[in-house]
Image (cartoon, rainbow, N blue to C red):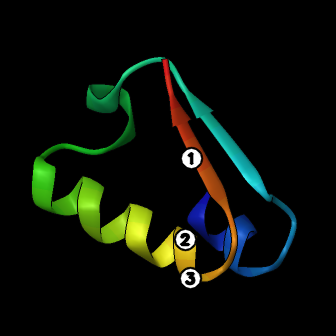
């Protein structure tokens, strides 16, 4: 999925829960920041 974001194929990610997005808080924050730099929005239910 991250590869598709980097390729410009995805601009929005909808996730059921944070636990489905990443294994821990550090990974979640790191990934969300990378996505934000590319103007990709991430929404958690």
Label pair 2/1, CB-CB below 8 angstroms: yes
Q: Position of residue 6 (x, y in %)?
A: 69, 79
The mark nearer the N terminus, 3 or 1, is 3
Q: Position of residue 43 (x, y in %)?
A: 55, 35
What residue is drawn where x is 26% and y is 28%?
19
Q: Nearer the viewer, residue 30 or 7?
A: 30
Task: Report whether 43 appears left or right of 10.
Answer: left
The mark nearer the N terminus, 2 or 1, is 2
Height in image: 39 above or below 1?
below
Residue 42 has which mark?
1
Q: Position of residue 32 (x, y in %)?
A: 42, 62
* Residue highlighted by disc 3: 37
Callout 2 crowding tier (Cα within 10 Å): few <14, some 14–19, many ≥20 = few
Q: Nearer the viewer, residue 45 or 19?
A: 45
User: What kind of element bears circle 1?
Assistant: strand
Callout 3 crowding tier (Cα within 10 Å): few <14, some 14–19, many ≥20 = few
Height in image: 6 above or below 45?
below
């Amino acid at each position: 999925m991250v590869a598709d974001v980097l390729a410009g194929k995805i601009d929005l990610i909808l996730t059921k829960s944070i636990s489905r997005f990443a294994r821990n808080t550090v990974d979640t924050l790191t990934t969300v920041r990378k996505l934000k730099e590319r103007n990709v929005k991430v929404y958690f239910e």
